[in-house]
Image: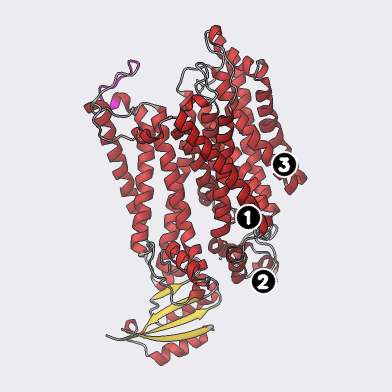
Amino acid sequence: MSDKVIYVMYDDDGALKDGAKKLVAKGVKINEVFSPFPIHGIDPIIGVKNTRLGIMSFLYGLTGLTLATIGMRYFMVVDWPMNIGGKPNFTYLDNILAFIPISFEFTVLCAAHGMAITYLLRNKTLPGMPAQNPDPRTTDDKFVMEIRLSENHSISEDEIDSLLKETGYLELDKKEVK
Amino acid sequence: MQKEAVIREPLILGHKTYHDITEDVCRPIEDKAPKMWYILFGIALIIGLYGVGSICYLLGTGIGVWGLNKTIGWAWDITNFVWWVGIGHAGTLISAVLLLFRQKWRMAINRSAEAMTIFAVFMAGLFPLIHMGRLWVGYWVLPIPNQFGSLWVNFNSPLLWDVFAISTYLSVSLVFWYIGLIPDFATIRDRAKKPLSKKMYSILAFGWSGRAKHWNRFELVSLVLAGLATPLVFSVHSIVSFDFATSVIPGWHTTIFPPYFVAGAVFSGFAMVQTLLLIMRKAMGLEAYIHTKHVEYMNIVIMVTGSIVGTAYITELFISWYSGVEYEAYAFINRATGPYWWAYWSMMTCNVISPQLMWFKPLRRSLLFTFFISIVVNIGMWFERYVIIVTSIHRDYLPAAWSMHYPSHIDIAVYVGTIGLFFVFFLLFARFFPVLALNEVKTILKGSGQSYKESPDYHEHH
């Protein structure tokens, strides 16, 4: 199905945010916003849900803690208990104080790297990926709003155009996509 | 947009626009490198290569080429290791702890401070590896299944904790740094004209888009990584201090070591940040972003951590007497009045007296004075580690075994070589990477930029 995409460019983050507020109040669905830096407060306006990567990080951390505990118990208590200066090594609990630093470090290691890898995969940002922004200026000082006609059945293209005019944009570009 | 009191000094001077920020940071990367860069790079490379050559000689011959002896089994190697790790702590403190405290001034300096962290930890990691003598069996520190009777590494040993601490610290700092770099690489990618640099920065930018959803994730990932890196900063140098504190050597066996080492690490790290940034801001024309206020903030951190370090020195001196343990007391009397008195008093002068000068506002706002003090602190913190390590072991329980440590030329060459290598990395970073988190700085332009703060309608909407 062919679709028409409208790219509206602003030269100020505040102008885009105010424009987005007006459009959304009139029932226009904004598909995406591209900006050189995070525009604070834009997410609830255009309906971007908060990410759940924090929960993932917690789960990766728990995995790390579990692995470290299982590993150290196996190495130090089960497989080859060493008698180091007579310090107790017969159960994990006897020796737990010595295991705290590595348990902590391994938890952080897994939480940080697990989350970072998930972040890159979810964003589809990986080495060698082509640039995904519609205009090279959106990584400098321009802010672009993307509106798809297929997501706005209740409102006509002309109506959107006239609403956009009121927001004081810099440039407007329309593209047919498949 | 977040507004702040007008009396607060602006963080971005002059009348900058978003585009100006991009221009100011990207221009040094896109232009030809100045002649001075090639000169400095050449000097650093020669020193670095001399260090690499000395390391090769060391590995080929054995660590006997160092000035160690039967009594003094640890000297410059571990001193340099702790010195470099300590320097590394400032970067993560700036980017993680100051992020949690929402300190906006961090944004101008976090990128280069983190780069400094990573390169410093590279240099630090070199010393434990080469001090094994047989570098090629370095992987034995990892718990890998093996055929030596399934012999495992000792998880009770602080030295093994250190392996985990340093490798976690290095890799997490690297990831934190790179995730912040991706949007800035995208800016350079979208500006690049030459095909080769376009290609290179496209690969580095990972196809970054700047979508609202991606920024939402970016901010959370930065926050969580900062939350994870904050305890990491404190744990890494605590664990480094355990290398000494869990032993029973008088002078090392002290519970004050972890907080004392962490404060000392931040102290020396900020000094190195000052040394590097004061030159970099000038050479790259970034005076509008890294200015006197930033330097003053960093000097306050130096003053606070320097005072903690000074308190720790005096506390451990007092406790050595108050404990009533004569060996402990002797270790400290020997430090101050024995054959290494000059090292002890250099350390005291550089680390206890010099940061106290920062109480005076004209001094802590003087760039020249700051630069001088930052060098003094770097020297003082090297002596601190040397004093702790060498003076505690050079006179042990048996006077027949008492000895002195004289560095061999390989000792010196390896140490100076790491300084050369560090600057090779840092100069390459300054040449090819965005040295300022330019897109993050744009977020504070309207709140903390001079032209916005001076405009009449700054405080209208409240």
**Magenta-drawn segment:** A85-93
Badge 2 is on which residue? Answer: B457
Check disc 1 and report its element: helix, strand or loop.
Answer: helix
- Give the residue displayed 67% in from the left and 51% down from the top: B279
Q: Could you tell which of marks 3 and 2 lies nearer the N-terminus?
A: 3
Check disc 2 and report its element: helix, strand or loop.
Answer: helix
Of tags 1 and 3, the one toward the viewer is 1
Is residue A104 at least partly visible in the picture? yes
Of tags 3 and 2, the one toward the viewer is 3
Magenta span contains residue B92: no
Q: Quadrant of the C terminus of chain B?
A: bottom right
Q: Looking at the image, which is closer to me, A43 or B16? A: B16
Check disc 3 and report its element: helix, strand or loop.
Answer: helix
Label 1 to label 2, Cα distance in Å? 47 Å
Of tags 1 and 2, the one toward the viewer is 1
Q: Is residue A79 above or below residue A114?
A: above
Q: Do circles 3 and 2 both sit on a common chain?
A: yes
Disc 3 packing (10 Å; few <14; some 14–19; many ≥20) = few
Q: Quadrant of the N terminus of chain B?
A: bottom right
Q: Is residue B446 above or below residue A30?
A: above
Disc 1 packing (10 Å; few <14; some 14–19; many ≥20) = few
Q: Which mark is residue B372?
A: 3
What amino acid is at disc 2? Asp
Badge 1 is on which residue? Answer: B38
Q: What chain does badge 3 belong to?
A: B
What amino acid is at disc 3? Phe
Q: Left of A113 or right of it: where is B3?
A: right
